[in-house]
Amino acid sequence: MRRSPATTLLAAGASASLGDGIRYAAFPLLAVHVTTNPVSVGAVSAALSTAHLLFGFHVGAAVDRFDRVRLLRYMQLSRVAVVLVLVVAVLAGQASLPLLLAAAFLLGAAELAADTAVQSLTPVLVQDAGLERLNAGLTASQSIGEDFAGPAAGGLLFSLSPAAPFAVIAAAMGGSWGLLTRLRLPPREAPPPRPRRSLTAEAREGFLYLIHHPSLRSQALWAAAMNLSVAAASATLVLYVVQELRLSDSTYGWLLTGAGVGGLAGAAASPWTIRVLGRLGTMIAASLVAGVVTLGIAFTTSVWLIAVFQFLAGFSGVSFSVVGRSLRQSITPDALMGRVTSAYRLIGFGALPLGALAGGAVAHWLSLGTPFLLAGGLMIVSTLTLGLLTRRAQAAAATTPEAAQRGA
């Protein structure tokens, strides 16, 4: 039975997300076994997202210019190659901090290009009415892999052998590549020809569209503040669990799983929360909950309570992501989709390495609990400022829809 293109993309994304989830648990654990310095551990987390700062401006122009499906296939193969090198190094006892930093950076760069291509493909596969359904499906599979099954498997596999999780990551990325070889896009009208320009000039067009669009601009800044906070807390969570609470590697993986279960519940509940609270109401409520539970981690040593906080953080994070992605896609022209997506991710996800480095530095100089206090506070403050600015911009656009389409 032949799968629809949307189903094929979902399956390929699910396989890649499983690999990413294992990576999210395995990389920090390997880093802690290589070095116990909080700044160095934070640097490994930062390296995973540094590509957003270095390549985020141009990757969208490349996605819009080249075949998006073919680009996805190349990125999955490149991730297989990088992880296999890491497997050999771990088995040979040659895993080092520089190698971890290099592998994390390369995997992050490939993930950036792949995620931008996926988000640019989504509006091509479904009509506007189906955007939230497909985005919820992609986010649910991402949550299952990256936050539920992946971290639990990563922690368990690492406790058996440090090389085991990385071998499984390679298999998951290879499976994603195999599924993508079967992805065929539905026929669509060819875009009008336009003069060939440099990638920088084309990327600038998408960036200017975003910063001149009030709703997209404030939403991107809001996402940046949230991601900065999440990265600061996440980068030190492994140290907080392993060193402060004296828990095992596998327990750390199971704690990450709590966020995955919450994320899956958040994706399933998104249609209901949107009906009850509206799109922006859902985003505001979700980010406030995320801030409160992040603050809560600093005030408890109970592993069960931290697991509950992780569940609520996952629920709110996925709710925020599903609605925010659908909002952006619904008001962005297809010809600019890749460039606007990359500009958004440059601002929003470019904050991840900064947050990870800041979290590691704060934990090193102050305490392992301080990053959670600062991160939770920033989430709440950004919601009460940038979140309300986004609501105001959306209200203004609703009264002048033609202005919204022009990005006025």
Image (cartoon, rainbow, N blue to C red):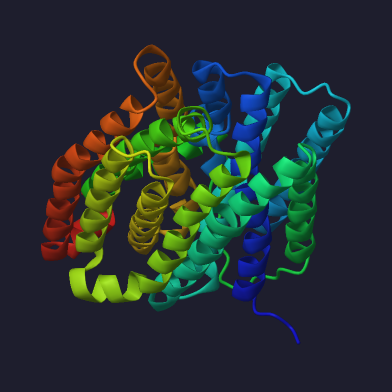
Residue at 19%, 48% in the rendered image: 387
Q: Quadrant of residue 394?
A: bottom left
Residue 178 is situated, as x and y percent measured from the top left of the image, at 80, 62
Answer above or below: position of 36 versus 112: above
Residue 357 is situated, as x and y percent measured from the top left of the image, at 45, 22
Using residue 211 as the reference point, say whether residue 230 is left or right of it: right
Using residue 366 as the reference point, say whether residue 215 is left or right of it: left
Q: Quadrant of residue 300?
A: top left
Residue at 27%, 58% in the rendered image: 405
Residue 224 is situated, as x and y percent measured from the top left of the image, at 34, 38
Residue at 67%, 31% in the rendered image: 30
Q: Quadrant of residue 197?
A: top right
As drawn, which residue projects farthest toward the bottom?
Answer: 1
Residue 376 versus residue 322: which sits nearer the camera? 376
Using residue 190 as the reference point, say whether residue 207 is left or right of it: left
Residue 31 versus residue 279: which sits nearer the camera? 31
Residue 201 seen: no
Which image quarter is the N terminus in?
Answer: bottom right
Residue 380 versus residue 370: which sits nearer the camera? 370
